[in-house]
Amino acid sequence: MWGIGTDTACLMCPGGNESRDHLFAMCSFSRYVFATVMRKICLFPEALTWQDQLQWVIRAWSGSSDKAKAGRLLWRLSLNYIWREMNIRQYGSKHVCSPVQIVKKIKDERILIAQNNQSMLSIGQKFIE
Ligand SMILES: [Zn+2]
């Protein structure tokens, strides 16, 4: 996996191969998480590669507007939770989460972040349910 040259099935969705491009750009699990978490900010792009997604994020959310801050925060949280979930599955835990549960975890963490940061509180109220 991850450039070692083996061809392993994705642990998150049926049919995909485990790779960075698949997990963060093409995987149906991840696409659901990104699209749902971002739905108040934007129509998250259906990028074909990690690099394309990264370029899009840099173009869309550079700067210090509330929307850019919210986009970066939610994107980072989404990546973090998708990565954690992939690791949980890789090590055979029975406590796996559905994409809907991951979105709920991201929402809960976003609320915690907002409670500890006044600027994120107003951003959260505007862009995140
Ligand atoms: Zn997948």
Image: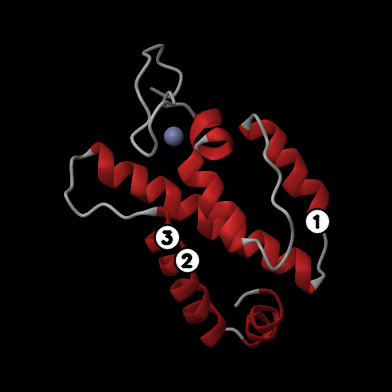
The amino acid marked with disc number 1 is Ser
Q: Are marks 1 and 3 in contact (CB under 8 Å)?
A: no
At x 41% / y 67%, what residue is drawn? Answer: 105
The quadrant in which residue 128 appears is bottom right
Which residue is the site of mark 1? 62
**Which SS class for mark 1?**
loop
At x 46% / y 72%, what residue is drawn? Answer: 109
Question: Does 13 sit left or right of 56 as displayed?
Answer: left
Which residue is the site of mark 3? 100
**Where's residue 58, x and y in %?**
77, 47
**Which SS class for mark 2?**
helix
Q: Nearer the viewer, mark 2 or mark 3?
A: 3
Which residue is the site of mark 2? 106
At x 38% / y 62%, what residue is drawn? Answer: 101
Visible residue check, residue 40 = yes
Q: Is the residue 122 above or below the residue 21 in the image?
A: below
Q: Is the residue 20 above or below the residue 40 in the image?
A: above
At x 43% / y 55%, what residue is drawn? Answer: 81
Q: Is the residue 42 above or below the residue 31 in the image?
A: below
In the image, 31 versus 71, the foreground residue is 31
The quadrant in which residue 14 appears is top left
